[in-house]
Image (spheres, rainbow, N blue to C red):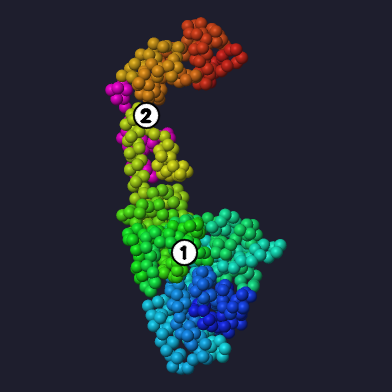
Amino acid sequence: MSRLILAVAGHVDHGKTALVKALTGTDTDTLAEEKRRGLTIEPGYAVLPLPGGGTADLVDVPGHEKFIRNMLAGAAGADGVLLAVAADEGIMPQTREHLALCDLLGMERGMVAITKADLADENRLAQVKADCAALTAGTFLAGAPILTVSARTGLGLDALRAAIAALPPRRRRTGLPFRLEVDRLFPLRGRGTVAAGTVSAGQVSTGDVLALYPGPGSVRVRELQCHGADAEILEAGSRAALLLTGDAGAIRKGATLAAPGSMCLTDRVDVQLTLLADSPFSVKHGARLHLHHGAAALLCRCVFFDRAELLPGQTCFAQLRLDAPMAARAGDRFVVRFFSPVTTVGGGLLLDLSPRHRKKDPGLADRLSALASPDPLRRMAAALEGRAFPQSLEELAMAAGLSQTEGQTVLRRLEQAGKALPLGAFWLSAAAMEALERRAAALLDSWHAARPLDPGMAEQALCTRLLPDHSGLSEALSAELEKLGTLRRRDGMVFRPGFRPRYTPELAKIRDRLEVLYRRAGLEAPEDAAVEDAFGPDASACRQVMAAMTRQGILVPLGAGRRIHRCPLSRARALLLELFQDAPTLTLARFRDRAGVGRKYALLLLEHWDQEGLTRRAGNYRVLRRDNL
């Protein structure tokens, strides 16, 4: 398994391919057109055995300015750079551009190889070495080894191998979900499609199902290889070739293979953008740019939040609005090139992949600064504060550029600091929870004011109003609001602390009218709709009072949308029991005649007692259920 991936970069015809071949024995120019033209067009790959054990992957990237896109695709997964500078020509335009690109891609290690040393004398070599030291000063290659080599004579190759072996290994994010940007692709007739690239995060095994981004589709890993050797599992830092089945025919170079659900598909993203100090152009608000991300290249429009123009050497926050969806993760690096003429002008970090803020949001700069911070606590806090609704651990970890294990640890630390709150399997910021508290209090206060007789609002209804897209969190949310003292719960209802149902003077008048109405109706229970109609414009208030009187047991519901006052109902029940003392069975007709009501009302009463469990129908008779008497 590879320990280090180095991009071999530099100006066209500065001996990169010859140097790789001299080091590894592999000719990375495999295309017929590359042979014919004598230059590298597609990235080439070779394995370098290192002294003391281990290997390094060398990625021979194109040096011609017309193939910068291919250069970026090959260098995107590299840990560092082997910058080639020909002794006879010295530093050239693509030398500078490739160094800048590697810096923008976040590389932190590498060295300079002065190639074709056999074509220069000592004075020339000393001058080129001094020029290289000046070029790399202030960059990630400042103080890095500058070695003199010759692919033709073998001069300095052993020293170069030793210097590569001495490079510190890169810390790999194996805890992140699997990810690979496809930079090579070819079919195997009858077997599937082979996609190759660098495993930039996580690990992959044979049999895994992977999502294709930007999609749609999914593939299954049939076989794995690393440098032609079969493997069962490959981790971050490996050059991998995956034999895929499924929707493999939909894969294109520049696509991403990743664990399902682990990438964000977006067409706009907030970024931290830096222009190169020697950029030939500034970037104006709304400018069209070429965006390079991983192995993909897209067009975008750049929108600034606080300025009309970004000058060379400056850094600011901006939003890139893409012409097509891009799959990414927060913290990814990107490069931008001027629209026309096409030349590299800068790059930076992807910060927020789902921006939902206003352009003039006063807290935007602080939040984006936190997302750009190396401190995972600040990034996670900013990810939480950017949303007013609950977010899953997976969503938050992705937004903060962390693995789920790292995300869980950071969230617990934020919880202890009072800045994060778990809600079921989701999380909220303390500020978002305070906003929910205020909304819940306002909703309940409004509910009580409009319905002073109701015992409260349905718990599920309140939570649906507060979190319409998270119905499964109703219990957790209402429990948290109760713990905070915002509400109380009883029998599926929620209400404000201290609230008691009460009759206002207006509702008390309606209650008294209903009391008289239902007592007069006796056993001939009126329909609810007829009673409400009788109150005209006060029908809604009448409905509230009827419901309250029913909860209090003053009115008793019967079938067919009717209610009866408890006093005549009690007298009718006494009559029923008296009739059963005379005979063990009772007919509808006999009860009707003794009660002095029509058949319809007599039937409603008998069916009510059947449902209550006092009587039971047996054919055309009722019998008394003495077990429930």
Residue pointed to by mark 2:
454
Mark 1, secondary structure of its residue:
strand
Q: In this view, does 617 lie to the left or right of 92?
A: right
In this view of the protein, which residue sits in the foreground, 174 or 259?
A: 259
Taking the spot 46% from the left edge, 52% from the top edge, the residue there is: 392
The amino acid at mark 1 is: Leu
Q: Is residue 119 visible in this depiction of the protein?
A: yes
- Furthest toward the right, the residue is 190
Q: Residue 68 at x, y = what percent? A: 50, 71
Q: Is residue 548 visible in this depiction of the protein?
A: no
What is the number of the mark on residue 291?
A: 1
Q: Give the crowd class for mark 1: few <14, some 14-19, many >=20 residues within 10 Å.
A: many
Q: What stretch is highlighted in magenta?
A: 479-508
Q: Residue 407 at x, y = what percent? A: 44, 59
Number of marks present in the image shown: 2
The amino acid at mark 2 is: Asp
